[in-house]
Amino acid sequence: MDWIITILTLVGIIDTIVLAAAIIWGFILWARGITPVLLRLGNGLAKRKIAIFAKGENVGSLRNLLLDSKLFNQKNICEITKLDDIGRAENAALYLVFWHDWATNIEEILRQKSDQCALVVYAPYDLSRIPDEQMKNLDGKRHTAVTNFRGRLLNDIVASMITTSYEK
C-alpha cells in the first residue's frame, strides 16, 4: 500500500511542476505581448504631439475634447488655424483635421504629413459628407482614419498613437 502512496505523491509532484511551468510560461507570453503595446501607448500619450487643424470655435471644441479625456497634455497640442501656420505641425505625430474647415487645403496638409505621422479626419455627420474623390485620396495615405462621431474620434486618436511609429 505504501508504494501506491509513493507513486501518487510522485505523480502529484510532477503535475505541480508542469502546472507551475505552464503558468510561468503563459505569464511570460502575456507580458511579451502586452508590454510593447502599453509602452507605445504610454509614450504616445505622454510625449507625442498632436496638431489640430481647425478654425473658429471648432479648434477649441476639439482641444477641449482631448483635454477633457485626461489622456493628453495641453503642452503636446498644437493648434493650426490658418494655412500660413501649417509648418508648425512639422514635429507632430498626429494630425487631427476638422474636415469642413480645411477641405479646400487638404492637399497642403497631406504634403506636410510624413509617412510616419497619423492623420485623423473628423467630418461630423450633420455637415456635408466628404466627396468620394477626396475619400479615395485619403484612403491612399498611410495611417489615415476618417470619423463622423466624437466618441469614435478619441478611439481613432488612441489607436493611432499605438500603431504609428515613435522615436525612442
Image (spheres, rainbow, N blue to C red):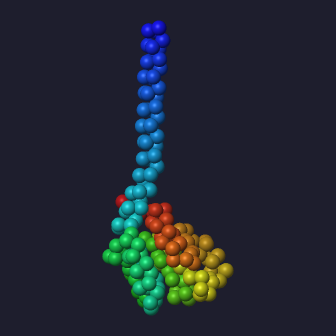
- What residue is rendered at 51% in x and 69% in y? 156
Q: Which residue is drawn at 47% across and 34% down?
A: 22
Judge whether 45 appears above or below 99 on screen.
Answer: above
| Tag count | 0
Which residue is outermost to the bottom? 56
Compared across the picture, whether 151 is left or right of 66 comes to right
Q: What percent of the width, then of the height, locates residue 38?
A: 41, 57
At x 56%, y 81%, the residue is 123
Where is residue 112 drawn, in percent x and y?
47, 78
Residue lying at the far right of the rendered structure: 132
Would residue 118 be visible to someone looking at this image?
A: no
Image location (x, y in percent) of residue 125: 60, 82
**Residue 4 seen from this side:** yes
Query: In the visual, does 25 lie left or right of 130?
Result: left
User: In which quadrant of the rendered image does the C terminus lie?
Assistant: bottom left
Which percent across, then down, holds residue 161? 45, 66
As drawn, 139 above or below 84: above
* Residue lying at 43% horizontally and 42% vertically, measured from the top left: 27
Determine which quarter of the picture holds residue 62: bottom left
Q: Quadrant of residue 82?
A: bottom left
Q: What is the residue that sits farthest to the front in this orientation?
A: 1
From the viewer's side, name the closer residue of 75 and 125.
Answer: 125
Q: In which quarter of the image is residue 24?
A: top left
Residue in the foreground of this view, choosing between 113 and 118: 118
Q: In this view, does 72 lie above or below 30?
A: below
